Amino acid sequence: MRIELTVNGERQEADVWAGESLLFALRERLGLPGSKNACEQGECGSCSVLLDGRLVCSCLVLAAQADGHEVVTVEGLAGDGELHPVQDAFVRAGAVQCGFCTPGLVVAAADLLQRSPQPSDDEIREALSGNLCRCTGYQKILDAVSLAASGADA
Amino acid sequence: MSAPVPLLVARCRALPGSAAGKHSLELGRVGESAARVDGIPKTTGEFAYSSDLAAAGMLWGHTVRSRHAHARIRGIEISEAVGMPGVHAVLTHDDVPGEKRYGLEFPDQPVLAIDRVRYFGEAVALVAAEHPEQARRAAAKITVDYEPLEPVVDPERATEQEPLHPDRPTAGHGYLDDPRPNVIRSMVVRHGDPDALGDVSVEGVYEVGIQDQAFLGPESGLAVPDGEGGIDIYVATQWLHVDRDQVAPCLALEPEQVRIHLAGVGGAFGGREDLSMQIHGAMLALHTGRPVKIVYGREESFTGHVHRHPARIWAEHRAALDGRLVAVRMRILLDGGAYASSSTAVVANACAFACGPYRVDNALIESTCVYSNNPPCGAMRGFGAVQTCFAHEAQMDKLAAVLDIDPVELRLLNALEPGDVLPTGQTLTGSFPVAEVIRRAAALDPPEPEELPRDPLRLPGGSGNTTHGQGVRRGIGFAAGFKNICYSEGFDDSCAARVRLFAGGAGELQAEVHCAGAEVGQGVTNVILQVARTELGIESVVLAPASTADVGSAGSASASRMTWMAAGAVQLACRAALEERERTGVDVDVERVYRHPRTWPLDPETGQITGGPAHVSFACAAMKVVAEVDVELGLTRLVWIGTAQDVGKAVNPQAVYGQIEGGTAQGIGLALMEEIQTRGGLITNASFTDYLIPTTLDVPPIVAELVEDPEPDGPYGLKGVGEPPTVVSTAAVLSALRAATGRELARVPVRPDEIVGL
């Protein structure tokens, strides 16, 4: 079936099989492999994207459900050669190791700061508790989100 | 050496070393906290992981796996699958071109099952199709005629049951001769007088469940035929050259015809030491003449790699009234599952680190690993030392209680120091500041207990809002542990690096470094670049993608050895390149091979050293944990962790802290929640819904201190840092839970019903 959607501000069309997830369509049909597949069950958050501005696991959304809607992926966060403050903070705080969880965490953290520009430590922990990371033990991820929040305020 | 075939990987825009410059990150030299060179592409989504690769005309591979833990295969019917839409190949063991078996150390595992399956999830057949769903549907049409057999599932009974490998693949390799069926390796360490009696004795029986590496990026890779009979495999792995050496014989190819290229790795932790899709993808690609990509799903990943050995440990510690250890007696039983993988080395490590970082003059340690029809086990971060640390630290806490000595004081009293003799007879040399590490960790002050009422997020049960603080008890625990750095027991371990020095456009000196060390997330890319900048005294250094095609083996990104070995090799190659350029005055390209000090095997009868040390170096860590336990509901919340670790010299302090925090989190997982559940050998929780790993709400703030006591044999004085935090953290968490509950808690992961009803 044919779907039309807006991805990172651009109109896109894709021929998808009815059972395909939005994640598969982004990665394999639209050339946007930044969103990762790590669990297929909405448990790990690696595939997090914004669907009409709402944080979702794109593995749990059918590609067909995104027809006519607007999607922002990790590839759409950085501006013209400028990293998103969350991306910059992740690099500087040492929040990236293998990095497989990073795109999902960056999207989730950007969404958090959009809603709550000065989150408390507990708020950050709760907001990111749906994003699994196996490498970092999270400490530097939490540092990065705080750093991005403080930078946004400065 | 032929060049890698140009791959149509349009997505592979960001290779290590290419992206950081434009964003003006400080890349730094040895000892500086330089930002990761791959950090930016990993945050923007540009970094190409093995699952992100694509090539023109690519097919998708799928693996048919056994649903039985143990069965005879009477036949495999593929004809219906062959005719399914989009299907280009269906292959079975008949189609394996060369050797039918492979293995990391012993070739005991069929590439595709031949007449028998020995574990749940064993690969039986392969499909390649245009779309992954077509491949899955065709796979479902393959009929395997199984005759189920009684599975061997209890490691204590395995040595009396029918042998799963009658040809005894691990026999005759210099190990203790143990004729019992299903023994992978037995080892005994006898030291001093194991019958020596102390004034007091404590005993315990400890159990460790089977832990999964649970790296976030499932196994995946892309195999591309080169059109001349050879193959390029782009894969997430830990050791490129050992992959090549296993793949080539099974494909009936020369090693040079198989080129392994490191694709982006989504975590490893030991789980990528063994092959996953490499041979399968290559078989499909060579058969169809088209690139083939295989990507495991999460459920498949649980059967796609080896796990941490589950263990049962019987321990007795004897001590004098003043607290000095007199004798340790320990029996360790490890379940290796269906194939040997690196189990023989895990057996040796479990023995070597059974007593902990303490002076023990008299010891009897027996360690045995058996074959079974449970999930295959092999390398996972901590490698045999995690299981025994959990046991020896529980024993130390018991001794402290019996002797009424402060647990930290008891550990300090017995702490090893250079010059002491280990139970294997090896004299401890070089850097080993365990007393300092224990003191530094013990001196870290945990936060005061937080007042009630408080936000439920900061109580056991969290946002479930299950308590207002009633029934919640607090406990503080402590543990110390150690582990070997680099390979041991006489393994001829080496790492190659190649450095090309050339004049840039404006005549300035530039360098290109080649090293096949696997960047698995630990940060070895930065280490290599920091060492090269330090040695060459220039900024313009790039690291070529890791490949078997243009540099020698780097060895494995495991055993906390990669930073040590890569730093040694790059240092050597840089110095040689500078010297040659100085001498010749022209552009140079030199390759050098680095070896750490030699080790020797242990005596198979006594477990004592023969000829020289069995281990190169050791690193230790100590940890204090504060836990709160809701003893009405059995829920736990970790409040705070303080740790000190012996790192030799921190090449990149920020990355070292990251290793300590991440390694600690994996130990927390084993302590509190992580276990692969099996029934009759069948995995029942192969998903992230049912196999839980720690989240942001499970890992508390971690305060880490680095103890930098240079290792004389390590480049720049460094030691590996990845494993000690994982070795010690499970034990430290359990110590805190015991302090909170008064229970023995002899099994990990701890179940809620073990800490309720006080």
Image: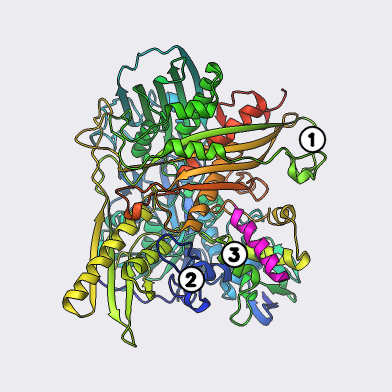
Q: Nearer the viewer, residue B355 or B465?
A: B355
Pointer 2: what residue? Answer: B26
Q: How many residues crowd mark 1 within 10 Å: few (<14), some (14–19), many (20+)?
A: some
Q: How many residues crowd mark 2 within 10 Å: few (<14), some (14–19), many (20+)?
A: some
The secondary structure making up most of the magenta span is: helix
Labels 2 and 1 positioned on one and the same chain: yes
Q: Which is closer to the viewer, label 2 or label 3?
A: 2
Q: Which residue is drawn at 47% across and 37% down?
A: B386
Q: Using the numbered discs, state the Cα–Cα distance from disc 1 to disc 3 in whole angstroms.
A: 35 Å
Instruction: Pick whichever of labels 2 and 1 is earlier in the sequence.
Output: 2
Instruction: Give the mark count.
Output: 3
Segment colored magenta: A138-154
Asked if disc 2 and disc 1 are in contact, CB closer than 8 Å, the reply is no
Amino acid bearing label 3: Phe
Pointer 1: what residue? Answer: B469
Callout 1 secondary element: loop
Asked if disc 1 and disc 3 are in contact, CB closer than 8 Å, the reply is no
Amino acid bearing label 1: Gly
In this view, the residue farthest toward the left is B583
Q: Would residue B722 be visible to someone looking at this image?
A: yes
Q: Check residue A147 for magenta coloring.
A: yes
In which image quadrant can residue B377 be found? top left
Q: Check residue B205 for magenta coloring.
A: no
Whole-percent x, y for residue B138 in the image: 51, 59
Q: Residue at x 25, y 56 (%)?
A: B594
On residue A90, the disc is 3
